[in-house]
Amino acid sequence: MSDSATLEAPPQDAEERQPVTKKEITADHPTWCPGCGDFSVLAIYYKLIQKRNIHHEKVTTVAGIGCSSRFPYFVQAHGAHYIHGRALSFASGVSLSRPDLHVFAFGGDGDAFSIGGNHFMHTARKNVKMTYVVMDNFVYGLTKKQTSPTSPLGFKSKTDNWGAFDRPINPMKLAISAGATFVARTSHTNPKHLLEMMDLAMDHDGFGFIECLSECTEFFAGAFDASNPRKGGEYLLVPEDHDVTDEAAAYKLAGEDFPGKFGVYYQVQRPTKNALEAGVSDAAKAKFEGKKDWEVLQTTFNRMK
């Protein structure tokens, strides 16, 4: 890590500080519809911050536009409610310039895979260090029921009242093929599993992607009943013998019929963009080590002659 990017340690050691309470990290009352799956994700995010003993100034919450993207409003910490589909570009800048922060980005299926699809692909391939949780509900909920990139075939909405016939994307296949180094799947109906996946993603040194099925009870109720044991479904975990470093095996797992499996599909270690850029910066500074400011400027001017 570049010395230039390392901030001074806070005057008080983190171990001496009292862990934050849920009340201290709650900024506002969530405004989602009753029963929305996003409530569960937010509650687990609070729990993760408390469990890891992260203080306000060490966490950043970034989101785009959509129901799920209201997250920064509800967390008392650094955060930004950015423009539609561009959350990952903003989060990348935060991650690269402030390596001391834990960067979390949140989005929905539209924000992540439609208008933000290009940013998703490039953030994944560049392996920018952050955790990205996409609350996939198979519908545009904030704008009152339009077909989203993940809506299933036949889904009737205000934009496809005859039933959707455009083939939906597969977020897991997309993430794996784009180059994400941590790819996992979970659901809001299983908070314990959700916390486990977010915990693992946070520890991963690279781009951690989590698809979280999050039911929109207002505009697509029952969409994920097949994965909910309380409603007669099955919550099947990734087999214990699955090799998370095997890209082909992960891709095959992602191709299973809905509701599929839940857990870590793929995880490998690859140099992050953060580390690579820090290396470039350190190499550039090494050329001028020991020189005064005016000598650095003079060297640059001489090179321009």
Image: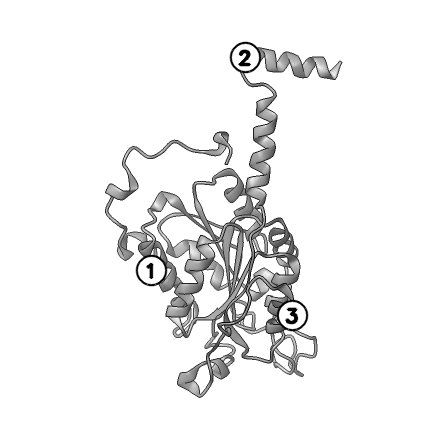
Q: Which mark is residue 104?
A: none
How many neighbours does mark 3 have within 10 angstroms: few (below 14), some (14-19), or many (20 or more)? some
Residue 193 can be seen in this image: yes
Residue at numbered disc 1 = 47
Q: What mark, if any, has residue 169 been given in the picture?
A: 3
Q: Is residue 264 left or right of residue 55?
A: right
The Cα atoms of the two marked residues, 3 and 2, are separated by 55 Å
Question: Left or right of 215: which side holds 151?
Answer: right
3D distance between C-alphas at marks 2 and 1 = 49 Å
Q: Position of residue 57 (x, y in %)?
A: 36, 43
Q: Nearer the viewer, residue 241 or 304?
A: 241
Secondary structure of the residue carrying tag 3 is: loop
Question: Marks 1 and 3, Cα distance to the nearest angstrom?
Answer: 31 Å
Residue at left 34%, top 49%?
A: 54
Q: Is residue 269 above or below residue 222?
A: above
Element type at mark 1: helix
Q: Amino acid at mark 3?
A: Ile
Query: Residue beneath label 2, please?
Result: 292
Label 1 is placed on what type of residue?
Answer: Lys
Q: Is the residue under label 3 in contact with that under label 1 (CB below 8 Å)?
A: no
Count of numbered tags:
3
> Which structural element holds mark 2?
loop
Asked if residue 223 lies left or right of residue 167, the reply is: left
Q: Quadrant of the C terminus?
A: top right
